[in-house]
Image (cartoon, rainbow, N blue to C red):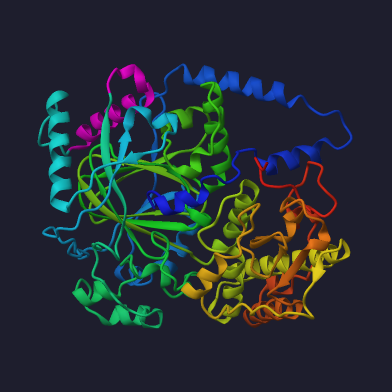
Amino acid sequence: MEETSDAKRRRTEGSPAGFDDVEEEARAEEDVGEEEEPDWDAIEAKRLEEHERILRTRPTRLTHPILDAPEFRPTREEFLDPIAYLEQIREEAEAYGIIKVIPPDGWAPECGLDWESPKRFATKRQRIDRLQQSQPYDDGRKYTLKEYRRMANRFMDAWLTREERPVDIGTATDWGELYDDYWNIVDRGAMIGEEIEVEYGNDVDVHKYWTGFVKPDLKPEQLSVAAAAAAPYGSPEYYRRSGWNLNNIARWPGGLLKHVTVPIAGVTSPWLYLGMLFSTFSWHNEDNYLSSINYHHSGAPKQWFGVPGAKASAFESVVRRFFRSEKKEVPDVLHHMNTMFSPSKLKALGVPVYQILQQPGEFVVTYPQAFHGGFSYGFNCGEAVNFAAPHWVEHARLANERYRRIGRLAVMGHDRVMFTLARHVDEMDDVESIAQLRDEIRRLAHEDAILRPRLYRDGVKDLRAVVRPPRNDVDVFDKQASDYDDKRVCCVCKHTCFSSAVGCRCSQTRVCCLRHVAYMCRCPPSNKYLIEWEPEERHGAAIRAVEARLRTLGGALAEKPPIEPPREALLGAAPRPRPPMNPVSPPIGWK
């Protein structure tokens, strides 16, 4: 997807932030062992010097051309099942991070926007000459669809006239000139001597405004390959039932969000995007490391860039060094999604980057953890949503641990999603993803099994004989479940507590996960009490259900014996000293 909402952005503001790579830190400690500690400051200073030397060469698309990401053209039969098709091409596609999917001939859904609607949507003002400064976007004006299109076209005409470009722009050469204009503004910033400002209609909720697709109003059990195949290809009913209708894909059979029925704007229900020349969707990866799919309904092309998920750490390192080289504080820039950085610079600094020119009628798909960003070549309208293919489980675990280290609230409680998947594991057919789910459920259960008795020994009160909190309902992840989860977010690391949490008599609202009890408050352990929503036998039942499904499907992964994970894998690296009750360090930046 392109960008997150203000609502999701507000959830991260004020939380502990930072970009220290904990995995690298832990690996470094492990490799060094008893030997003398390397001079990491000197090593980083040398890397920063090399970074600055490369950037002084002003890398461009001519000196460091960006390769195209692959495009895929499914047959009509393959096109019937988007989750299956995207899994089919996953191994090749993940190496690029982003791909283009061109529908079979005959795909031509009518854009369902109501151009006569009096509704006005909000925009964000973007200073293109300041995109490398990571400054928040200010609120722009509100527009009807017609008003926004008129404004965008006027800006486009004025720019083309000023730069002496043909008004009937549309060739690859013309887009290349606008490409150079954009990066000249972004890279030179204040040196261009003028302010270049545009307005971006991002995160327009399809439930409050419009969707470009046929609105399906179908229940999850009504979505199927068979139902889509029964409708004539290209008919209104086909577009209503197709999994490529972005109102359907998050709940499509085979996807892992099928039982997440709570509408999460931009995640399980689409957002609309109204763009203009140079309007920007800055570098980011998706919430919870989900995949995303973006459809271009109409208008000028969009220029996309992507970095493979496997190279996300390298991308983040380059961005950190860029801010240090500019003598600026290194903020949590990539989680606020307002920073742009030249793909040619990234390539010059060793980060693989790929590009896509997205035309109307084409899909762009991003894979888990892949950073992506881009801009528009003129007025256009797109729509985007998240989805989770079978192999997302491992990425979900990585996202959960990363968020806990930096104190970022996830859009969905990780533990609830995992146990909901375990409840419906008989609907899963991919052995590898089921094995990933088994290992993750084991890890979550094992963590609770270790920490609960430890906290009781430290003096935290056991309330099991006094009160029994309601058990978690994992049949479906609905609004009621989501609202309940919102009340049990760890006050330290922002993790959504699911199996258990610790409260204290000093507050009627604050709770804490079992990892960070010592950072909750200054009260003694005797003031604290442990809440258990999931008893050990329920954890065990979930594990056995997943293991039984694996045995039914067979294969070597089904025979993997239960193991006790090493402490670092279970709880994350903890290189700093900590109080006795606390099993791991607080989030980076915690005070």
| Tally of marks | 0
Residue 430 image position (x, y, % from top left): 56, 72
Image-based side of 214 in relation to 519, left or right: left
Q: Kindly indicate the quadrant of the structure image that contains residue 215.
A: bottom left
Part of the protein shown in magenta: 171-194
Q: Residue at x 64, y 58 (%)?
A: 490
Q: Kindly indicate the quadrant of the structure image that contains residue 297.
A: bottom left
* On screen, residue 177 above or below 283: above
Q: Residue at x 71, y 24 (%)?
A: 41
- Residue 179 on the magenta span: yes
Residue 201 image position (x, y, % from top left): 27, 48
Extreme front residue here? Answer: 506
Image-based side of 164 in relation to 228, left or right: left
Q: Nearer the viewer, residue 475 or 66?
A: 475
Image-based side of 401 in relation to 159, left or right: right
Q: Quadrant of the C terminus?
A: top right
Q: Nearer the viewer, residue 320 or 355?
A: 320
Q: Main secondary structure of the magenta part?
A: helix
Residue 464 image position (x, y, % from top left): 77, 78
Q: Residue at x 54, y 44 (%)?
A: 14
Residue 231 image position (x, y, % from top left): 24, 80
* On screen, residue 502 above or below 305: below
Q: Residue at x 50, y 75 (%)?
A: 480
Residue 155 appears in the picture as rendered: yes
- Residue 262 on the magenta span: no
Residue 4 appears in the picture as rendered: no
